[in-house]
Amino acid sequence: MASANYTEDQVRDIARTKLHLEETESAKAGVGQLTSFNQLGFRGVKDRPDGWYLPNETHYPALVLEVKGSNIKLGDKEREELLKNIRIVQTRYKHVVGLLFNGYELEVYKNEEQLSGETELMDKEHYLGLFSTNRINKLLIYSLTHSINDTLHFDFLIKNLYHRMIFTACALVAKRYGATLVKGMSFKLFTTSIRETLENSLSEDLIKNKKLQILLDVFSEIKLNTQCKQEAINQFIEDVSKISDNINSDFWNGEDVMAIFFNEFNRYKAKSESGQVFTPDHITSFMYQITDTTKQDTVLDAACGSGAFLVKAMCNMVKEAGGVRTQEAREIAQKQLFGIEFDREIYALACANMLIHKDGKTNLEHMDSRSVDAGWWIRQKPITKVLMNPPFENKYGCLDIVENVLNNVPKNTICAFILPDNKLEKARGRVRRWMQSHRLTKIIKLPKELFSGVTTSIFMFIVGTPQHKQEIFTCYMAEDGLETIKNQGRQDIRGRWEAIERQWVDIVRKQTGSDTIQWIHPDEHLSYQEDIKVPMPTRADFMKRALAYALFKQEIEEAPFFENVSANCLYGSPLKDEYKQIITPLQEKEIPLATHEWKSFRLGGKDGLFTITKGSRLTKADQHDGRINYVGASAFNNGITNHIGNDDELCPAGTISVCYNGSIGEAFYQDEPYWATDDVNVLAPRFPLTPSIAIFIATVIKNESVKYAFNNKWTKELMEKSEIILPAKSDGTPDFDFMEQYIQSLPYSRFF
């Protein structure tokens, strides 16, 4: 039977339909003979393309179409017309796809290079994906997700966000397994088709894992508007079909499309909804690589969420095995991927995600990862790698999950967990118990923008190997190259992540190559210590601390003093007589701080300025009435919080007290014997210490404390190793004479 002859207009219409060249908010698109490049934004260019797709963001690929009637054989003349148009579009876009089509013959150009093997005209997303190694158009997924969310929320009236996600995921599963979802279907036929396809696709797997029934149950529980308009059903089917086109195993190259979809959907979550956080796809890729996971491994995620880590592991391992059609790939999917998820609806999402990617769902379990049962289940599996992002909040048992995993996977298993930066610092005692059996080897601090409201790190353990004081490798990947696009989340719009990932995988593996690298001792830190620049102390800093000490010596409370002085300055309120002498200005000589003459000195240790001891705990019940100063974690009244009669563990006069807990870094000169609580470190000088020198050094110590916080306390051990900067003499020793003179030049020193 002879092939039909198409006119050029007919070929153009065929191309419009197959390519889906439709105008959107994010791109100009269309076909025709009347629109010039000049009208499309290429100033002064009168040539007219047959079809075009031009994103608003010029970082994304563009497409230009040249068509001919089917009676015209494609030759050099026709190719040159297309190449000319490609060059025009390249004046604004770095990546351009050119298509030359006559209804039967097709030639595809990536920029100006012709590609082989492209014989059938496909959706434009296929061609735009040619410039991405994963062949996925993220911009499309972001816009489709927004459209799907609105359709399900306002037309289908699905109020629960996770139900909207599950309904969409089930529709994608149905598309993946051949369901008939076409525009014009009735509501009943539409939902029945999804349900029946789900049942058929799960029928054999339900024999192996009855908990997969949860996916069917959750789908059935979703409340829908049965009177939904046909236009809304059509829109949903169209959007789902476009996303489904991106989840084609033939083009599966390591990226979890559903992870992008779920993360984008999750942006519409209300504060009242579940605390589930989905791991960005590029981070699952990074963790897969830094743990040296391969097709030989068996991977566990005991808080698997939507299954992002498992899908990432599966697609990378399958690719290494030679593709999805190999027997080895089938073995990987069926026997080397294990997941646990406690939240029933998120478990349903994970099942759907694995179904979409064809396998692995029979090894998903719906259970509490903190439980004894979960520990037993894990012990039965030959796990070699753990990739996890457990729920961060304590109410979800974050560290209980981590501990249960560490204690039940086989010896030598490498475990990588994403956790808040200071999660282990907060549970130092508990983590030290872990370290009696397991070794924390690496901490990789992640970009601060990765998860909203919390900064995170990857913590890597080797199971069954005690820490034995071995230091921990840490580094800080401050940038991942992604940028925030309005209403579209964080995206790699400039294509920077691939190079950044290679660089940091190399750094983590070799443990060299970055100036952010630190080796930390587990007794000192359990988190990456960000290099915080300590500000040089200013004249105002010294005056503030000198005034505080003057008020203390005059037995004047700070709060009412500052309230009265402020009212006097701002409103002209009368100044109390007892305050007048404090603020009466005196003739003073301002001495330059000469910052270039300062150098670093060790606070404690064998060669330090001070001998450092920790205060002693004394409960409220054990405190006897008396006149001895009781110095605690306070920023006021020279640190004195009470007066007691206990004198068995007094600290000597002429020392500096420094809070390391609570009001961290608050340092005070103590001129009488005192009791220091266990929140305080006591600095006994190895040099003659006057009140003025003490005030000077206390000011510098307070500035240094910006490096520490409640979850990273300035303990005695850390303080012994700390250094502070002080004025120095030409022989390199501290210039105590200068410190004395400088404080004495301040007006408040007359009260010392």
Image: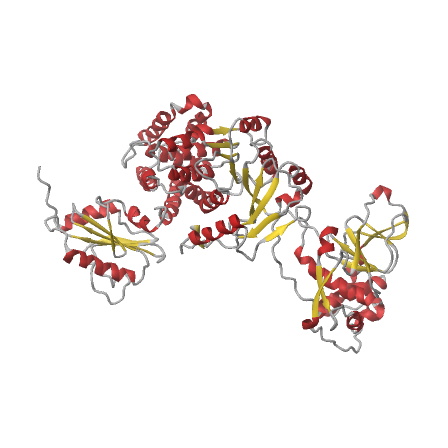
Which percent across, then down, holds residue 547? 78, 66
Regarding residue 627, the answer to whether it shows in the image is yes
Which percent across, then down, holds residue 417? 55, 41
Total labels: the figure holds 0
For the N terminus, which image quadrant?
top left
Residue lying furthest left: 2
Q: Is residue 693 above or below residue 247?
A: below
Where on the picture, by quarter, is residue 535?
A: bottom right
Residue lying furthest top: 207
In front of the other: 60 or 36: 60
Q: Is residue 701 above or below residue 430?
A: below
Q: How is the image coloured?
A: secondary structure
Q: Is residue 151 left or right of residue 88?
A: right
Which percent across, then down, holds residue 354? 41, 34
Which percent across, then down, holds residue 315? 40, 38
Q: Is residue 437 left or right of residue 43?
A: right
For the C terminus, which image quadrant?
bottom right
Q: Is residue 22 above or below residue 306?
A: below
Regarding residue 161, the answer to whether it shows in the image is no
Q: Is residue 490 left or right of residue 473?
A: left
Name the residue located 57 percent from the left edge and 33 percent from the top edge.
Answer: 411
Q: Is residue 723 left or right of residue 460?
A: right
Name the residue located 56 percent from the left edge and 36 percent from the top edge.
Answer: 412
Where on the picture, by quarter, is residue 111?
A: bottom left
Name the residue located 73 percent from the left edge and 73 percent from the top edge.
Answer: 730
